[in-house]
Image (tube, grey):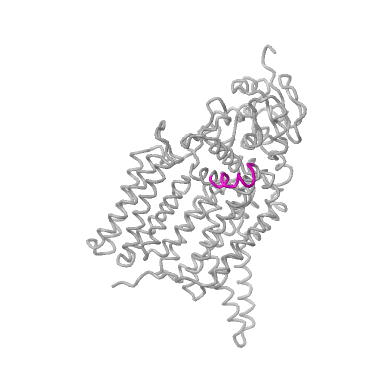
Amino acid sequence: MRAPLPHSRPTPRPGVWVIGWLAACLVLSAWFGAAAVRLDLSDPDSSLRLVAVRDLLAGRNWFDPVQERLFPPDGVAMHWARWIDGALAVLIGLLQPVLGPSRAEVAAGFIWPFGLLAAFTRLTWLAAREIGDMDGLRVEAGIAATLATATAFPVLEKFGPGGFDHHGVQAVLVMAAVLGLMRLDRWRWGAAAGGALAAAMGTAAESLPFAAVGAAAAGLIWAARPDAAGKGFFAFGAAFALTTIVFFLLLAPPTSAGPVCDAMSPAFLGLGLAAGGGAMALAVAGSRLATFPLRLVAGAAVGVITLLGLGFLAPECLSGGYAALPADLKTNWMAQIAESRSAATLAHEDPGLLLALGGVALTGLAAAAAFVRKTSRDPRGWILLGFLVAALGVFVWQVRGAFFATALALPVLGWAIARARRDWREARGAAGGSGRAVGRAAVFALVLAGSLGAVWSAVGVQVQTRFAGGSNGGAVAAGTGPVAACYSGAAIASLDGLPTGLMFNPFAIGPAVLLHSRQSAVAGPYHRNVAGLTAVVTAMRSTPEAARPVIEQTGADYVLVCPPLPEGRWFARHPVDPAMRPEDTLAGGLQAGKAPAWLTPVEGVAAPLRVYRIIRAGE
């Protein structure tokens, strides 16, 4: 009989990860807490998520995700997973009788992300102990990974107060899948891995690469050790298929027009059933597939059939969720969003930001490669390496993958820190080893520094300031300072001093307009808002005369601008006609406070916002 897969046993001293979690909560509260109390949410996704939650609490149909105030009258049907809206609605609904509506939202803005962070920190701690177990460093690796997690930017800010978007949920689900795959010899953990990956896929389509890597990892472990992993592999497939069915019934509208590639749909249902059912069939047939090559071929055949099925059900989805975007939007909208740019683009435009986003992940890749080289026959290192390579692949395509890559690097970085520390201590204690101890100390210091996101952030700032002339971060990447004032709830609430109407607005603050005022917005930073985004991109890059009919066709009553946002400067520097001067565009003029005659300034709006009423022909 084959030896069972190695796995961790129940561990004592759970307070270690709790200390790290509390430290991270304190850091995040100091950074984001004051803004979260005011619901000044610089992340547009969090703002619009809260708007959707309010709609649910007001009686909106579960299968009606349309935001009517975003490019009315038809609105925009959002593609987000409704179950997160529902969970937040339950939490806020329970808090409202005690705290009232406004304070309940604020309280949820702390409870929700901090609860997710607790789950993520514990899972990372457990995964690090699995890796450290190979070197007799279970305890030390767990402690080190917890330390790295407490400073793990850009992961940590996804769990900051006021964070209502789905990224924290994804991090928890993917880390749960990694841990489950490491313990695939137990059917419960196999089921946990399959369920977590299917839930991640159902929550956001960007989790598809991790679902594919997880399914491949489970299949390879089964192929290598069918006796030890057979039951776990069967449970993995069953949970993957069952969870996909549940998410389809929960999230997919009963009727939908055309194929859907960015949310739960028949295409995703077919993918989940094929992958899950294939895993179950392989596990059942394990005794008939007597050799490793035969099992490998059978597993590859299931994977190919699954992909062919996806191509048959929804060939459009093979090109990704953004494939249908017009070229103009890809150039003049997505290029402004820092996390949607490629690593190559960011290296040219903002190398300091690239270092801050990718430094920990690259250190983790080196650590994972070293671990696999040392323990090549153990699947645990390969599991982490596979997930990390997939995340880095996403990172190269769009730097939003840095979030996943950093998260997945943390367990193996815990091992690397613990191992470097032990090597240093052993060299220091060896007779006549002072020179060797100095070298080991240097290695330990480098590994520790490379594992801390705060160090890479500081390095990135210095690189950008000294060598690249300051940051060129995207328009949506708001943080603190003048840009954050554009998202201020108090400033945007001042719009309600105007008659209710439709704002022709910077896309970055469209969700904040919906959250903090009764006004409607033409644009938000969402790929389904094609008409609104196209109108903003076209009008702001045109001359005032050419922009006027574009704006009037949207039915807008006002033009809203906020000069600190990079969005206006981008449009001015990228006019429709390359021969135009930036100041001759509508965006350039409004940035300078010079409005055409058909726009009249409106008084009483809080700075830094500026609002102009549109004077239509005949008025």
Extreme-left residue of the structure: 288
Q: Is residue 93 magenta?
A: yes
| Rendered location of residue 263, percent (x, y) | 45, 41
Q: Residue at x 61, y 64 (%)?
A: 20
Extreme-front residue of the structure: 97
Q: Is residue 321 magenta?
A: no
Extreme-top residue of the structure: 618
Quadrant where the N terminus sits is bottom left
> What's the magenta region?
90-101
Quick one: 225 or 428, which is closer to the camera? 225
Position of residue 106 in the picture relative to residue 589 (left or right): left
Q: Residue at x 64, y 58 (%)?
A: 25
Q: Residue at x 47, y 55 (%)?
A: 174
Vertical side of 21 occupied by 209: above or below: above
Position of residue 136 in the picture relative to residue 164 (left or right): left
| Rendered location of residue 242, percent (x, y) | 36, 50
Quadrant where the C terminus sits is top right
| Rendered location of residue 513, percent (x, y) | 65, 34
Quick one: 95 or 258, which is closer to the camera? 95
Q: Residue at x 63, y 55 (%)?
A: 356
| Rendered location of residue 84, percent (x, y) | 51, 45
Our reading of the magenta stretch's main secondary structure is helix
Picture mark count: 0
Q: For residue 333, which quarter of the picture?
A: top right
Quick one: 167 or 332, which is closer to the camera? 167
Vertical side of 492 occupied by 130: above or below: below
Q: For residue 213, which quarter of the picture?
A: bottom left
